[in-house]
Amino acid sequence: MKSNGSVYVAAVIAALAAYFTYQWWFNPARAIKQRLGQVAAALSVPAPDSDIARLERLAALRRYLADEVRVDLAGAQPVASREAVLAIVASLRQPGGAVDVQFVDTQVNVESSSSARAYLTVEVTTSDRTGQPTVDSRDAIVTLVRRGGEWLITSAESRAIQTRP
């Protein structure tokens, strides 16, 4: 009887290990959240910024966007190509220093093995003229596709967060 119990315990431990390995390593939602974190890091600018570091961030951002990406920001004209998005990001410069971009409250819906949608809040923290941090928050919807084993952003839509009266 003891050997039967040991076999059952070993089987349960193996099943749990397989489940947690899948959740940690192969889960598409986790991979998408990791990709979104990489995009946020590429959009963030440290206070002492060099031209080389800026080019490295742009090159990283280029790898995360599909060729036909479409970005639609509230109050601005939609942008419909990766090169146009990169040109806009490259032209943005914060005169006061650092820009910190974070994606918070991220919810990922994996629609199929090759498409997903993420609902998130984008928080951009900058410094005002007095050096005090200023936070701008917007809700966003990001659509991703899986190509060549990598998750690429195909569209991003942002709008101002609705405030309650």
Image: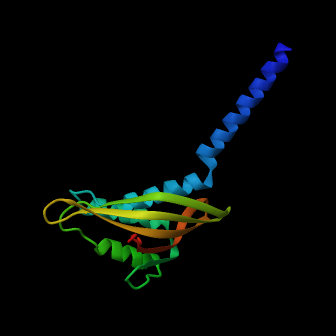
Q: Is residue 112 left or right of residue 120?
A: right
Q: Which residue is at 37% across, 83% downward? A: 75
The C terminus sits in image quarter: bottom left
Q: Is residue 145 left or right of residue 139?
A: right
Q: Residue 112 appears in which quarter of the rendering? A: bottom right
**As displayed, is residue 72 above or below residue 6?**
below
Color scheme of the displayed model: rainbow
Q: Depth check: 119 or 115 in front?
A: 119
Q: Which residue is at 39% across, 70% downward? A: 163
Q: Please, which residue is most extreme toward the right here?
A: 1
- On the image, the x and y values in percent for residue 68 come to 52, 78
- On the image, the x and y values in percent for residue 64 come to 48, 64
Q: Which residue is at 45% across, 75% downward? A: 82
Q: Is residue 116 visible?
A: yes
Q: Residue 2 appears in which quarter of the rendering? A: top right
**As displayed, is residue 115 above or below residue 77?**
above
Q: Please, which residue is most extreme toward the front here?
A: 165
How many marks the image carries: the answer is 0
Q: Is residue 105 left or right of residue 45?
A: right
Q: Is residue 43 visible?
A: no
Q: Is residue 42 left or right of residue 108?
A: left
Q: Which residue is at 47% across, 79% downward? A: 81
Q: Depth check: 56 or 73 in front?
A: 73
Q: Depth check: 131 or 152 in front?
A: 131
Q: Please, which residue is most extreme toward the bottom here?
A: 77
- On the image, the x and y values in percent for residue 63 come to 47, 64
Q: Depth check: 88 or 60 in front?
A: 88
- On the image, the x and y values in percent for residue 89 come to 34, 72
The N terminus sits in image quarter: top right
